[in-house]
Amino acid sequence: MSISNEDMIEVIEALFETNWIIRGENRHIYHVIKRNEREISKHLLENYGLKLIIRSDFIKLEKIPISPKNWMGIEGFNTEMDYVLFCCAMAFTEEKGEEEAFLLNELIETMTLFYPEKDLLDWTNYSHRKSLVRVLNKMVNLRLIEVIEGNTNDFTEKKEDYEVLYKISKYSRYFIRSYPENFDTYQDGESFIVSEESNNLTEFDSRTRIFRQLLMEPVILRTTANEAEFYYLRNQKHFIESYFEKFTPFSFELTKNTAMLTLQERKTAYKTFPSLKSMDECFIQLVDIVRKENFKYNALGEITLTENQWKTLVDNHAEKNMFGWSKKEQELSREQLANKLFNLGKEWGMLVEGEVGEIVILPNFSRNIGRYAIDSDVVTTKESKKGKTDGLTEVIL
């Protein structure tokens, strides 16, 4: 018996939006996948080029981006050290058995040996201890390790003489992909990334690469290097629309310079823009300010601003719209506001850094816009492309 469209929608949502489908916590989805294992595995491989891992206790989809982006990373990690320590900690767990217990100091000793620049790691340094705490808390959150006794956060203050007892989870060894190649064959991280991108271009056809990008990235932007993919998108627009409407809750949107999936209303399972955060609302109001300036854009729909032009835009934005912002946003200095808006746009792939302090506005930036009601104390809402934005009377896409 073939899986229903409703079940496939639920399965794709669960696989792409969670790290693990744990049998004891999500029995319904787990058993739907188990009953339709062959069909679902084939669907994911043919349409996204992704492999499904099915075990007796959990199911995991190996979600691999076509190419790395600046906004990709681990939520909550703030520094390069966070990522290095995380890799060292994962190397430590690989040497341990499932459910094996270990002490914090045992991990610290091993990580000190693994750390590539040992002279730069100092556990008496508060920021280094704080980095390790972020890493360990993230590993607990990802179900890679479990705390048996003690409090990880206390290590921030109590230095190296403090102990916490952990154990390795049954999911830990499945978190990082296994590679057939020896990493010693790569000169550096950059050569590894180039190899991965090259493999993705040769191993998968255009449809598979595009479908994976659409579901895993906020937008596909037209560039001089992907004209062939946009040719495919234009020619197969109706097929792509029908696929995503059939198997996901998304609608497919295609313009000259952008391709993306959108939602008619917010779904809690997905991280969407705009969210309910007040800074998101502040950001989409900025689009209205930019539109009225009539800036010139290049052949790819990009607008390049100087640092002063960007600051002037933010100043104008604040003067016009600050009355409706939350107290937190109102108390920001203009410089702080400009930085927060830029970082938010950068996170969602709508803004990038140009040369010598320039700000480049990408074409998907203009797919959002929000305005306050005029002469009205009552503010209504309209659905936006990836959710609803409370507080705005108009959201144009």
Image (cartoon, rainbow, N blue to C red):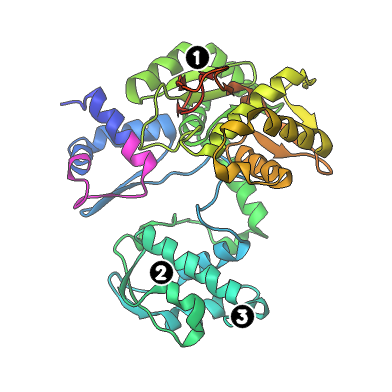
Neighbour tally class for label 3: few under 14, some 14-19, many 20 plus, Cα within 10 Å: few
Q: Position of residue 380 (x, y in %)?
A: 45, 20
Indicate the secondary structure of the residue bearing disc 3.
loop
| Residue 315 figure quarter | top right
Residue 112 lies, with reference to residue 89, above or below; the image says below
Residue in view at x 46 percent, y 88 percent? 161
* Nearer-the-camera pick, 267 or 231: 267
**Mark 2 lies on residue:** 94
Q: Which mark is residue 236?
A: 1
Residue in view at x 38 percent, y 41 percent? 17
The reply to whether residue 110 is visible in this rendering is no
Query: Quick one: quadrant of the C terminus?
Result: top right
- The stretch in magenta equals 13-29
| Residue 61 figure quarter | top left
Residue 62 lies, with reference to residue 11, above or below; the image says below
Q: Is residue 349 magenta?
A: no
Residue 47 lies, with reference to residue 374, above or below; the image says below
Label 3 sits on what residue type? Asp
| Residue 2 figure quarter | top left
Residue in view at x 46 percent, y 24 percent? 262
